[in-house]
Amino acid sequence: MSKVVLITGGSSGIGKSIGEFLFDRGFVVYGTSRNPDNYKESKFPILALDLKENNTIVESVQTIIKKEGRIDVLINNAGAGITGPIEEIPETELKNNFDTNFFGPINVIKTVLPQMRQQNDGLIINVTSIAGYMGLPYRGVYSASKGALELITEAFRMELKDFNIKMTNVAPGDFATNIAAGRYHAPLLEDSPYKRPYGNTLDLMNAHVDSGSDPNLMAKEVFKIINTNNPKVHYKVGEFMQKFSIVLKRILPDKVYEKLLMNHYKL
């Protein structure tokens, strides 16, 4: 029997690549978007879901269960970027980012868990970020929201052991997607004390995305995880140096690692 997969944010970027990869291999795939009418040419159905509107989460999950009778895999992929000096990012944008990157995925998990528990089977894959392993300058809010999702997954895994429900994190590095277009950018203010370093860092971040890896690398990793009996707690996907940066953080003194980051961002 083909596995039923729900991918939040499955209309573009990494989510779309994962969805098409799985669909082409016989999976029953459902994606989500806040504006599904914009994706009528999608290979798989796109349901209306806004991570900040819990009723849309419930409706999407119920739609799939009613049609398919089960949900085997949840891929929490939808998320939002945010950049800027923490001092200058409005509180509403701080909360908005956590609503999308942290509270939203948790609410999707909570909504699918009763069905997975009834099945006595399920897999939840949370797409986080390599940025979630370290506090990056001018991406601190994004690092914090993705890092929080990484940590709560560790706790969730242990709580779900009794129900044969597995959970894991997949942390991508920089991939060639349109994430920068949907990112919240704190404006580059002429009179800001952060104008020069923030401007330089912003240019560097955008260049990394533009020259990023092929999203199909993420699709292949997710496919392997789905076909793994006992997934690891954490997976990292991306360029060698991006993945190696996590190892360096683990082994280097804090101030040495901080200096490496500041040199990288020319701060």
Image (spheres, grey):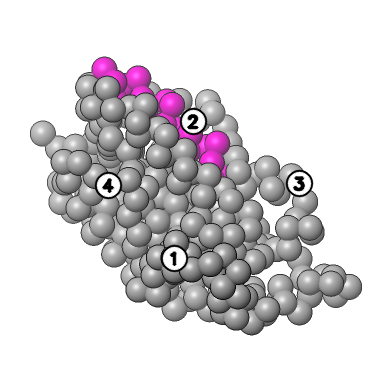
Q: CA distance from mark 3 to mark 2?
A: 22 Å
Residue 192 appears in the rendering: yes
Q: CA distance from mark 2 to mark 4?
A: 23 Å
Amino acid under disc 1: Ile
N-terminal label among 1 and 2:
2
Amino acid under disc 2: Asn
Q: Position of residue 110 (x, y in %)?
A: 43, 26
State yes or no: discs 1 and 2 in contact (Cβ < 8 Å).
no
Residue at 50% x, 75% y is 208
N-terminal label among 1 and 3:
3
The circle drawn on residue 232 is: 4
Q: Nearer the viewer, mark 1 or mark 3?
A: 1
Amino acid under disc 4: Lys
Q: For the magenta stretch, what is the residue range?
A: 100-118
Q: Camera-side residue: 243 or 4?
A: 243
N-terminal label among 2 and 4:
2
